[in-house]
Image (spheres, rainbow, N blue to C red):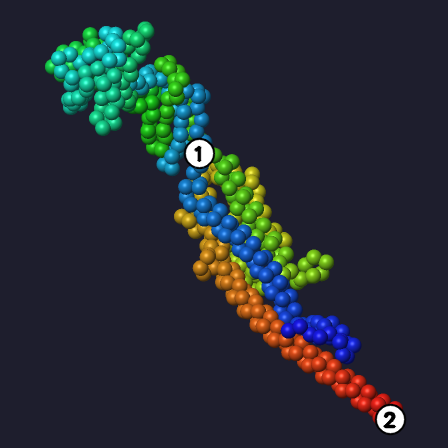
Amino acid sequence: MATISGLASGLDTSTIINQLMQLEAVPQDRLKTRVSTEKSVLTTLQNLNAKVAALATKAADLAKPAAWSPLTATSSNAAVTITTGPTASPGSLSATVTSVARSHQLGYAEQHALGDQVTGASTDVLLERFDGSPQTLATDGTLTGLVAAINDPANATGLRASAIQVSEGRYQLLVESTATGAAQDFALTAADGSPLLGGATVRPGADATLDLGAGIRVTSGTNTFTDVMPGITLALGAGAKVGDVAALGVTRDTGAVTAKVKDLVDSINAVLADIDVQTSTKGILGKPGALAGDATLRNLRSALVDAVYPADNTSMASLGIQVNRNGRLELDSTKLTQAYAADPVGVAERFSTDGDGFAARMATVTKGASDRATGSLTLVITGRETGVGRLEDSIEDWDNRLALRRSNLERQYTALETALSQMSSQSSWLSSQLSSLSSS
């Protein structure tokens, strides 16, 4: 509703109404300030929860026994590679390449144009495999048709055929197995078994072999040797040749283990530092932290520090981990490396789930705090989100209340101006009547 501002009274009624509304809105402003504060605290909690969740993931990963058997595989010759799997263990080998895997090839003698009839009396050809399973291939009889029939995926020949141009418009047929190994042997003849295209020069397929010394040789139909030792795979590269020698080794990577533990300790300290800042009663320049006195965070901090010690209170100091006077964790990397090198299995049990180890305990604590459904921090965040929602609903209710109040004030001041205007008109009329009586 528009007001008739000061037309009769001379008052700035719009300003008066605005000032009155500012007073009326004080409770709502307090609610808005409180919402802003609560959202800031909520953001702080969410950020902390994200750090705790990330810590839970790191701890859970380090608690897995597999994390405590990192191996480094090395080869002195790039043509022979070595990779390790979960079941691998430290060891060494010396390998000499005595043969490389290759496909079985047939190169046919006669030269023809692509459209020449090359299959003899019949347009069919006979494919005989090493395993004794013959296959008849239907073609149109031409060199192009023969290549197409061999390469047709529907025929599943396991072969690859090419028409090689050896001179202008003249081609010879080359057929090879798509897989390598001696077992890929095959023959391709006319339908009656007679030689095709003048007969073929054969390059037999071959297995790859490695001499590991002491009378031990390993063989593979491909250039990959799987599980030569448990979890250890060897492979010959494209540049491998007969006579290549490689010294192969698998060693325990103590540096990688130490780095993982250090990363976990650093992450724990980062969470502890964040909790200390947010729960401090003094804080920066004497101002309390956003979550000063929060019991959930105090309990979480205590649980993180307590997780350093197992149920039997065995100190982790022998492995280089202890709590300093500031309540932070310290890691002596040298001590941990030496302990792991001396007893890798025993040290792994002190950290992993197999022995209710340090990383496993830390994973339990952090998962209990950050779990998306039941985590203690998650529940606090959910409760505060609900509280912020209620405050925002109250602010919205105040919007409606203040709008109604402004409407009432505008109506009242409009009525005042109207009444004053009417009184002014009546006063003018009376004055004119009195003036006319005097003149009479």
Q: Which residue shows up at 37% across the image and 18% down it?
A: 96
Residue assigned mark 2: 440
Residue 11 horizontal/vertical position (percent): 77, 76
As rendered, which of 134 and 44 lies closer to the eye? 134
Residue 27 horizontal/vertical position (percent): 65, 73
249 versus 15 height, above or below? above
| Circle nearer the viewer, 1 or 2 | 2
Left or right of 154, for residue 36: right
Left or right of 37, for residue 439: right
As rendered, which of 98 and 374 lies closer to the eye? 374
Q: Secondary structure at mark 1?
A: strand
Residue 79 horizontal/vertical position (percent): 41, 20
14 versus 239 height, above or below? below
Number of other residues with Cα within 10 Å of mark 1, as a class: few under 14, some 14 to 19, many 20 or more: many
Q: Secondary structure at mark 2?
A: loop
Residue 112 horizontal/vertical position (percent): 25, 9
Number of other residues with Cα within 10 Å of mark 2, as a class: few under 14, some 14 to 19, many 20 or more: few
Determine the image quadrant of residue 46.
bottom right
Q: Which residue shows up at 37% across the image and 22% down it?
A: 236
Residue assigned mark 1: 71
Outermost residue to the left: 192
Q: Earlier in the sequence, mark 1 or mark 2?
A: 1
- Please state which amino acid type lies under the numbered disc 2: Ser
363 versus 191 height, above or below? below
